Amino acid sequence: MTVIPIRLVGDPVLRQPATEVTDFDAELRTLVADLRETLADRGGAGLAAPQLGVGRRVFVIAPQLVDGGVDHLVNPVLDFPDDEEQGGPEGCLSIPGIYLDTKRRLNVVAKGFTQHGDPVQVVGDGLLSRCIQHETDHLDGVLFIDRQVPAQQQRLLATLREAAWFDATVKVSPH
């Protein structure tokens, strides 16, 4: 297990859709362990493989959000049991220091696999739902700033434009 530097907005890997995991092997288990350790070191709510520069469909969730349940998903597929939405502040370890009110679905059912290839389902609401949607967006090459209304995006881009590492590409989430 290793703490890996987190890729920052502007790194092309954050804008590429991640590839599906087909081999549930030692390499995948090492990736999950590295994601866990890096997340614990940085203190976030979740962390996706592309944020470590790995274009694979896998993410981890902070243990306190899952209350002893599954803390990672491989090849997640999301379903929304209703149309309820939530607003609230959201940030990202790949966009340090920026927190914006972001609309997400209130409830989610995420199906996928464990690092061992066992099918798993995670049902979440509130912050857990927000985290699952945020990390799945990372797997699709979408950042939470892409979910802001255009005027908010423009203000944010104007603020960050001076940073050499910032990528001003905006993409709409498929979720």
Image (spheres, rainbow, N blue to C red):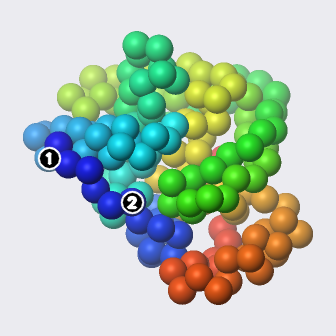
Question: Can I make out residue 85 in this image?
Answer: yes
In the image, residue 63 sits, relative to residue 147, either above or below, namely above
- Between residues 61 and 106, which one lies in front from this camera angle? 61
Residue drawn where x is 25% and y is 45% of the image: 34
Secondary structure state at the residue bearing disc 1: helix
Q: Position of 81 compared to 148: left or right?
A: left
Q: Is residue 37 above or below residue 113?
A: below
The mark tally for this picture is 2
Amino acid type of the residue that numbered disc 1 sits on in the rendered structure: Glu
Which of the two labelled residues, at mark 1 and mark 2, occupies the earlier sequence position?
2
Residue at mark 1:
27
Q: Quadrant of residue 75?
A: top left
Label 1: how many Cα within 10 Å (few below 14, some 14–19, many 20+)? few
Q: Which mark is residue 63?
A: none
Residue 76, picture quadrant: top left
Which residue is under mark 2? Answer: 6
Q: Residue at x 36, y 43 (%)?
A: 41
What type is the residue that disc 2 sits on? Ile
Residue 24 appears left or right of 95: left
Between 160 and 30, the one lying in front of the other is: 160
The local secondary structure at tag 2 comes to: loop
Question: Given contact means CB atoms under 8 Å apart, are the residues at marks 1 and 2 in contact?
Answer: no
Going 60% across and 22% down the picture, which residue do you hit?
Answer: 124
Q: Position of residue 157 (x, y in %)?
A: 73, 76
From the top left corner, tell me how far across and down residue 137 is, in percent: 56, 51
Q: Quadrant of residue 150?
A: bottom right
Q: Could you tell me residue 88's position as x and y percent?
A: 78, 39
Q: Position of residue 60 (x, y in %)?
A: 40, 37
Q: CA distance from mark 1 to mark 2?
A: 19 Å
